[in-house]
Image (tube, rainbow, N blue to C red):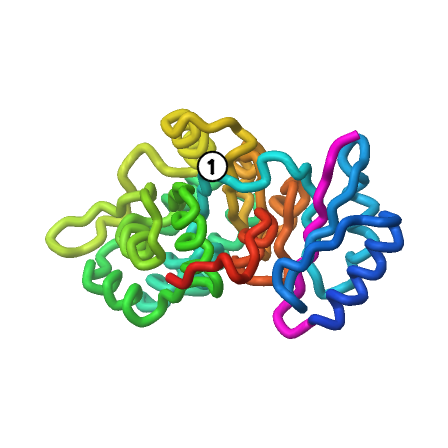
Amino acid sequence: MTEFVATLIAAPGNDAGLTAALAALTDALGAPRIDWLAEGEAVDLAFEAAGDGNAPALSRLVAAMPVDLVVQPAAHRRKKLLVADMDSTMIGQECIDEVADFAGFKAEVAALTERAMAGEIAFAPALHERAALLAGLSIKTLGKVLAERITPMPGAGTLIATMRAHGATSLLVSGGFTAFAEAVGAMIGFDGVEANRLLVENGRLTGKVAEPVVGPEAKRTALERGAARLGLAREQTMAVGDGANDIAMVEVAGLGVAYHAKPKLAAIAAARVDHADLTALLYMQGYRRSDFVTA
């Protein structure tokens, strides 16, 4: 038998839903040890079980409720390395779509972005195709988009600041562009940033991206390289993203999280956040609200 912990995390303002979900799981598990991480927000249920802790059955019990449920072994719950996607994960926007909006063809670029994130088309060709549409755009436009359009996802700063305060390293690895990722990484507090570089001539975008492209395999490599550099076991790592290009890193992480994700990623991730904000990643590691560090 293995000790497991089931963490219930409420959607904002849905403490009633959390109460109902807690009752359902308590009944199913018999006599779990209940530990409130934040009253009305998040609660742990500790229990012993074989195999996968019956996670699929427990998830079905609360599937229609406004809560997120993560079932995992209690061992190695606190992570020492977080690798995160940027667009629609750590920030609320897709940067390239916002840049295209300034150029007057957001709909065309956004459609390509959506298909790439859904896994309907290969990432690298879609990236090159979208970048080509930006050819001739002034580099100043990128700064304008960054200043006027890009906002952190709720809970992003608290997630990174809290993990850092407890000795963890965080890496922002994006299939987007350094023009945004470096600023976002500094703003939120990441320890390192990796992203694609748009090529520029005479102050204007050429429509090309520097090789090699930071895509799905590069994200997985970043996680594996980061863990090796820090001397960490796989179980001590966490990855979070929202699109199909995050599947590779989410699959190899000790805990892979699909954050308000596209179906292909959500289907394979060990943990899903469909209702809460990014502080859910702290609760699933066993942090209490009183442990949170504000960025």
- The answer to whether residue 195 is left or right of residue 259 is left
Using the image as rendered, state which of residue 140 and residue 233 is in the foreground. Answer: 233
- Asked if residue 105 shows in the view, the reply is no
Image quadrant in which you'd find residue 92? bottom left
- Residue at coordinates 81% horizontally, 40% vertically from top-left? 54
Q: In which quarter of the image is the C terminus?
A: bottom left
Using the image as rendered, state which of residue 26 and residue 277 is in the foreground. Answer: 26
Is residue 9 within the magenta segment?
Answer: yes
- Residue at coordinates 59% horizontally, 49% vertically from top-left? 286
- The answer to whether residue 151 is left or right of residue 286 is left
Percent from the top left, x then y, of residue 220?
47, 33
Percent from the top left, x then y, of residue 269?
63, 42
Q: Range of the magenta residues?
A: 1-14
- Residue at coordinates 52% horizontally, 34% vertically from top-left? 236
Q: In this view, does 22 lie above or below 265?
A: below
- The answer to whether residue 168 is left or right of residue 70 is left
Report the magenta stretch's main SS: strand
- Asked if residue 226 shows in the view, the reply is yes
- The answer to whether residue 196 is left or right of residue 41 is left
Q: In this view, does 220 lie above or below 265?
A: above
- Crowding near the residue tagged with mark 1, few <14, some 14–19, many ≥20 C-alpha atoms within 10 Å: many
Q: Report how many numbered discs are placed on residues in the image.
A: 1
Is residue 111 within the magenta segment?
Answer: no
Q: Helix or strand or loop: what does disc 1 sit on?
A: helix
Percent from the top left, x then y, of residue 289?
55, 61
Percent from the top left, x then y, of residue 171?
38, 43
Q: Quadrant of the N terminus?
A: top right
Disc 1 target residue: 216
Mark 1: amino acid: Pro
- Residue at coordinates 69% horizontally, 55% vertically from top-left? 35
Using the image as rendered, state which of residue 276 and residue 168 is in the foreground. Answer: 168
Determine the residue located farthest toward the left in the rendered image.
202
